[in-house]
Amino acid sequence: MLFSPEGSTPVKSFLNIGAFVLRVLGFFFILFFFERLLFVAFYFPEIWSEAGFHETLRAFYMPFRLDLSAAAYFTVIPFLLSLAFLFVGHQRARTVLTKVITVLILLFAALTILIHVGETVTYQEWKSKLSSRVFVHLAHPTEMVRTATPAYMVEFALMVLVLGLVVWLLYRKLLKRAVPVAAPGSWFRRFAIGLPALLFYAFLLIVAIRGGLGRYPLGISNGYFSNYHIVNDASVNTIWNFGDKWLRYRKGNLDQFFGKYPQEKAEDITRMLLSDHDSLTTKVVKKDTFNIVFIVLESWSAQMVEALGGVGAPSVSKVAGEGILFERVYAASWTSQKGNASIFSGYPALPRSPINQQDEKIRSLPSFPRSLGEYNSEYHYGGDLDFGNIGGYLVNAGFNKLFDEDSLSTLQPRGRLGAHDEATLPYFHDQLERAGKGDKPFFCSLFTLSSHSPYDIPGLTDWPTGGEWAAYAATIAYADEHLGKFFEKVRRSPIHDKTLFVLIADHGRTNEYNPFPYNDKMYHIPMIWWGGVIKEEFRGAKVDKIGSQYDLAKTLLNQMDREVSGYRFSKDLLNEGSGGFAMYEHHNGYGWVDANGYFAFDFDRNKVVESEFTDESAFADAYENSRAFITAVYRDFLF
């Protein structure tokens, strides 16, 4: 029995509610510990051989906040029901309410056991935590039963029994004991207890759910700390991960995007779109092996770059004039997390479906760090890589080292998001000098920060007359100034002759010259190659083929004669035979750009909402191509 009817003082009643909340939190927190222990025990030989004792041990305490958050989610409803005891005096009603709370807690426990055991068993085949594809399989339960091996069924049953025993013992120790929550005196006194209890304990539960009072709420990446995937999978709370994937699946409603379009036709058209027709790639670099530096420009739109017909960025425009300017490159998305995934994995962004949250898919994708296996790979950012699970993505993509605001905490000046470009660019130059002294080539990346809201760069204490747009323009000018200083240093450094620098934006943004979120101008971004490894005859060259962020992968790796077959949706922009097109995802659909124009499609309205096509036949071809391409990408994403 959870509650006993004996009376108590108002203060004691208030504290007893808190004691009950702690007992329920403890119940689930300990259950999560044993679930993780079961996973580690089941895969112990693999974990031990890969990671060793210390790394495995960290999987039990590093995800503390994720475990607490998941436990708090399960505690909310029992807590709210417990407040009813303040107003229920009839013994029979109290008994019924006690049973309701007990059954609810045990149902929650059963749910987490079934999900965790299902994940533990399927991990043998999938090598990942449960993801969106499990919901596709759940739509066909008979298929799941038919494909399950007898060994899987036995393992599933035994694990459920073991964790069921744990739940029984925890229930006896923590929840079966009487926890007095009395209903003393008048209704006023009861209300005087209930309202403060509701506000105080609800606040604590909300703080636990979001992972504290920090700037960003918890994300999956808060469970990541290891270079070993299996350790990270053991670390991340199963029920938290499952809930996150379920919400994203429901929001995305992925089934609507495939099944209506013939899969074979989609694959045929996509192969045609991505074919280079056996043409040769124009080699623009002097050799196959060189250092590589990516500078990912936060929120840089083409409209802000003079070299692309825009209004500013003289330093970056000067760099473009000394290197190779790709004039018609489009961001794959409108968020940093998706932009980074498209840049480093050569994979299109998908409407309503952030691939950077799909750990098992990221691990199956190629990436620059994996394709450059012998390179030392680093990623530097002055802000918080937990935002949007960017850090989790980068770990899964294979970067050797990540540096964010925790590592760069001494850099000045700083803003609300972290260290400004004025501080990170000189720091990054020093890191390149250090990396250049190593015995291996390096692949180093910097993600700039200052051109993201809240635009609190030094000297901009008050927003200019033009409001947010003018503040954004001021931060672009600020970043451009310090990029200019950075490249002046590089020109005088031995690094210059051995390195290819790639400047590419993570995404664009609406601005004074393009206020429309669907428009292709919103996604038009700079991509510039620069450095001493570029052949002299190509310095100052311009490439006008239409492409996307995800085309950088095949374009660059073909210059190095690397294997590119895994980048199945990327194309080589320096190959004369490859087609010119780009797909981007917007807030509620996707856009398509080719040589004849662009259009934007909205899923909710199920129609094209913007178009610059003037020829009906050209539009019909583009629309068919886009449907085929997005169907092929979605199918690949899920399976």
Image: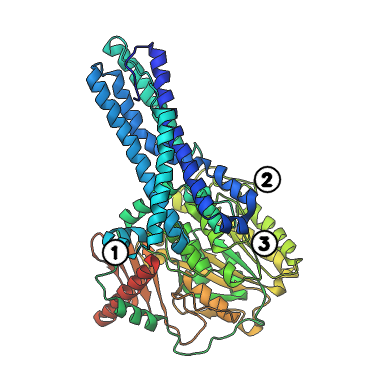
Compared with residue 599, is residue 184 higher up or lower down, i.e. above or below? above
Q: Amino acid at mark 3?
A: Phe
**Secondary structure of the residue carrying numbered label 1:** helix
Q: Amino acid at mark 2?
A: Thr
Mark earlier in primary sequence (1, 2): 1
Q: Amino acid at mark 1?
A: Glu
Q: Earlier in the sequence, mark 3 or mark 1?
A: 1
Front residue of this view, candidates 140 and 334: 140
Circle nearer the N terminus (3, 2): 2
Q: Could you say which is closer to the camera, residue 521 or residue 634? A: 634
Nearer mark to the viewer, of 1 and 2: 1
Distance between mark 3 and mark 2 Cα atoms: 19 Å
Residue at 39 percent of width and 47 percent of height = 160
Q: Which residue is mark 1?
A: 143
Q: Nearer the viewer, mark 3 or mark 2?
A: 2
User: On screen, 114 above or below 135?
Assistant: above
Position of 592 with respect to 535 (left or right) is left
Query: SS at mark 3?
Result: helix
Residue 13: percent from left, percent from top: 38, 16
To which residue does mark 3 refer?
486
Q: Quadrant of the N terminus?
A: top left
